[in-house]
Amino acid sequence: MVNKIKTCVFISGRGSNFLSILKYSRDYNFPIKIELVISNNIKAKGLIYANKYGIPFKFFSSSNQKNFERNCLKEIKKRKIKFICLAGFMKILSNNFINSFRNRIINIHPSLLPKFKGLNTHKRVLNTKDKYSGCTVHFVNSKLDSGKIILQKKVSIDKNETKKSLQEKILKQEHKLYPQSIISIFK
Ligand code: GAR
């Protein structure tokens, strides 16, 4: 694909979803190209991957949201970024920022939305009698984890499931669901 959509991935930590999207994006027919990684955590492991694979990356402190978003927008404009993937980015973006990228920001969340929006998802799921959990890729709107759902993947919760085992099981699915969702948006 000649004209891949210039994309920025926002991370805060491990960056395994970023790495998975990056691997898929090497395919000629994959619709996007990651041209920038932004982290609000200087210690994010994902930044090490960005460095390793030669993807431009920036750390901006998010302690002041206005400054953070101003810095992001400046860099995004400079690089003509048209699409944003939030991948383990643990900060809420302002309505202003979201509106300036309407329908062009997507996020992955480790539950079957609309169930279990917000933090500590797996722990909360395990406190219920639910037999299934999963992950969701959705468009970002002004309400937390509430934008239009793109794709979801369900996993079963086993009898002796722990927070760690559930998290690992779901993460494995996330790594496939995120790239599939990107393909489905641009097909
Ligand atoms: C993923 O499980 C993602 O779904 C979750 O954080 C993890 C990031 O992992 N996101 C959220 O909880 C957003 N509310 P990664 O840094 O290895 O991609």
Image: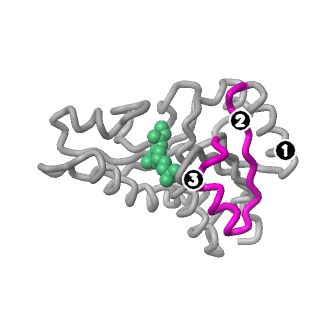
Camera-near label (2 vs 1) is 2
Q: Which of the numbered marks, if any, corresponds to residue 185?
A: 3
Camera-near label (3 vs 2) is 2
- Judge: label 3 CB < 8 Å from ligand 1: no
Q: Which region is colored magenta?
A: 41-65
Is 61 in the magenta?
Answer: yes
Secondary structure under badge 2? Answer: loop
Q: Is residue 154 above or below residue 145?
A: below
Is 5 in the magenta?
Answer: no
What separation in Å lies between label 1 and label 3 (alpha carbons)?
A: 22 Å
Residue closest to the far bottom: 28
From the top left corner, tell me how far across and down residue 56 is, in percent: 76, 58
- Judge: label 1 CB < 8 Å from ligand 1: no
What residue sits right under mark 1 in the picture? 77
Camera-near label (1 vs 3) is 1
Q: Which of the numbered marks, if any, corresponds to residue 150?
A: none
